[in-house]
Amino acid sequence: MPFRKILCAIDFSEGSRKAMVRAARLAKQHDCELVVAHAWYLPPASVAGEFVYPSELVKGIIDDHERELASAVEDARKLTPRVSMKMLDGEPWVKIVEVAEADPDIDLVILGTHGRTGLGRVFLGSVAEMVVRHAPCSALVIPNEAEASAFARILCPIDFSESSRRALDLALELEPTSARTVTLLHVVEPPRVYAAEGAIDVHPGLGGESQKLLETWGATAIAKRPAKLAAVVRIGRPATQILAMLGEDKSFELVAVGSHGRTGLQRMLLGSVAERVVRHAGRPVLVARPRR
């Protein structure tokens, strides 16, 4: 599944700068075009129905943003040759999604978190959250605290749906590296009355078949894209166990999740598991979905 075009949304914050560097690196690796987009937005303010911002102020803001965007694009071109830019006017997440929807060649949107919204690490900025929820293709979210190293250690939760298979395949395609380890995690969710939030040893009769199936899935995936494989089965609530593993092992550099697994939610919302992981992981998260 080679990438055709990558869209990177930036707001000139440190988080979005990191996202752009990652996007440029991926575009070079996959020999595809990088589109760097920025949406400037001045919330409406009026008195008795009249727009109150002086035209000189608006023009100054637009000029400043255009200069910053042009500068960012020049930086990106130092990393990859095929870079274009889009200056957008309007609600940022809406405009970014519109660009992705209008161009069927865009199959990955990359954006940073913790930009000008000022939200803490446990929440996505509103723009990033809305783009991830509504994008017509896969999205990669880069938190401000993410390292610039290659995605060599990947955690991929698997619920044996086509969604999670897509996430695994895309994670392996994303940034090939010679020293890559993929950990597949399947969480057996018991009846709510018995579920626990901590890690539980899996009874062989309960987890054995899942372990075998995980290993089969992994072997099929790495046969095409070599990587070291680990398979883990735990009992509990899926999002809780995924985040627990991330807390226990700080070496994971990417989490790859499917957006339409067994939750059955429609495109307007992420599944509850994916949404919690994106919000709380504290490292890059790839949300994989088929191009609509």
Image (spheres, helix red, strand yellow):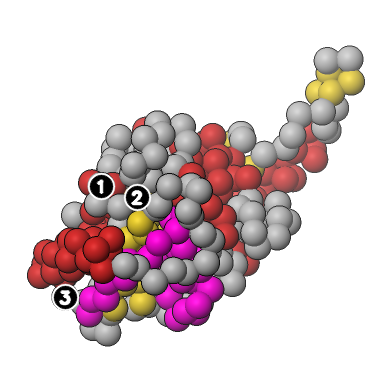
Secondary structure of residue under mark 3: loop
Q: Position of residue 233 (x, y in %)?
A: 32, 66
In the figure, residue 50 lies in which quadrant? Answer: top right
N-term-proximal mark, 3 vs 1: 1
In the figure, residue 291 lies in which quadrant? Answer: top left
Determine which of the numbered discs, if any, sits on residue 161 in the image: 1
Q: How many marks?
A: 3
Residue at x-position 43% and y-position 75%: 252
Determine which of the numbered discs, if any, sits on residue 223 in the image: none
N-term-proximal mark, 1 vs 2: 1
Q: Position of residue 264 (x, y in %)?
A: 36, 35
Label 3 neighbour load within 10 Å: few <14, some 14-19, many 20+: some
Q: Nearer the viewer, residue 204 or 26?
A: 204
Q: Is residue 253 magenta?
A: yes
Q: Amino acid at mark 1?
A: Ser
Direction from residue 20 to residue 45 in the image, left or right: right
Residue wearing tag 3:
226
Q: Amino acid at mark 3?
A: Pro
Q: Is residue 120 above or below residue 103?
A: below
Direction from residue 84 to residue 173 in the image, left or right: left
Secondary structure of residue under mark 1: loop
Q: Nearer the viewer, mark 3 or mark 2?
A: 2
- Of the 4 image quadrants, the one containing the C terminus is top left
Between the residue at mark 3 and the residue at mark 1, the CA separation in whole angstroms equals 22 Å
Start and end of the magenta stretch?
Answer: 228-255
Between the residue at mark 1 and the residue at mark 2, the CA separation in whole angstroms equals 9 Å
Callouts 1 and 2 close, C-beta under 8 Å:
yes
Residue at x-position 47% and y-position 36%: 269
Label 2 neighbour load within 10 Å: few <14, some 14-19, many 20+: many
Q: Amino acid at mark 2?
A: Gly
Residue wearing tag 2:
258
Residue at x-position 54% and y-position 34%: 94
